[in-house]
Image (tube, rainbow, N blue to C red):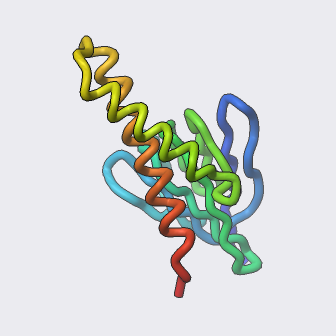
Amino acid sequence: MDTIHVDIVSAEGEIFSGPAKMVFLPAIEGDMGVAPRHAPLLTLLKAGEVRVQTPEGEEQSFFVGGGALEVQPTLVSVLADTAVRAKDLDEAAALAAKQKAEEALSGQLDKITQAEALAELQRALAQIRMIQNLRKPRG
């Protein structure tokens, strides 16, 4: 069976390492899928869901807050700003981060603070979307 090795790491440490039949990622240019023997690629990731289909047919989901992706024919490396297993996402914390970012954006901010607040808002919204999508049955 053809597989590709996947490593998902963040500053906090490694969150996943193992074989996969397919990996789906939120690339900055749009969502993409990576299969074994994929052409080499370097790109940035936006906040969103990384899905890993294992050789056994199971699917594991992770949230990444952005980062970098390197693809080689036998290896996918995700270097995430932040990474969390989907089951460990905290909806209340994501909603609180969204509200805090929205409040920050409603005030008078310098351009750097505004950019940081917008980035935090995007990460919070991506987490909330992922939590909502995980509640839906996949068919």
Residue lying at 55% horizontally and 82% vertically, measured from the top left? 137
Residue lying at 66% horizontally and 62% vertically, measured from the top left? 4
Q: Is residue 91 above or below residue 131?
A: above
Residue 43 seen anywhere in this rendered image of the structure: no
Q: Nearer the viewer, residue 127 or 1?
A: 127
Left or right of 57 on screen, residue 115: left
Residue 57 in view of the camera: yes
Asked where in the image residue 116 lies, by quadrant, the reply is top left
Residue 61 spot, x, y in % from top left: 62, 62
Q: Is residue 58 left or right of residue 71?
A: right
Question: Residue, x 41% and y 49% (percent of image)?
Answer: 125
Name the residue rendered at 25%, 12% in the picture. 110
The location of residue 76, given as percent across then percent down, is 61, 51
Furthest-top residue in this view: 110
Q: Is residue 103 above or below residue 42?
A: above
Task: Report whether 118 appears left or right of 84.
Answer: left
Quadrant in the picture for the N terminus: bottom right
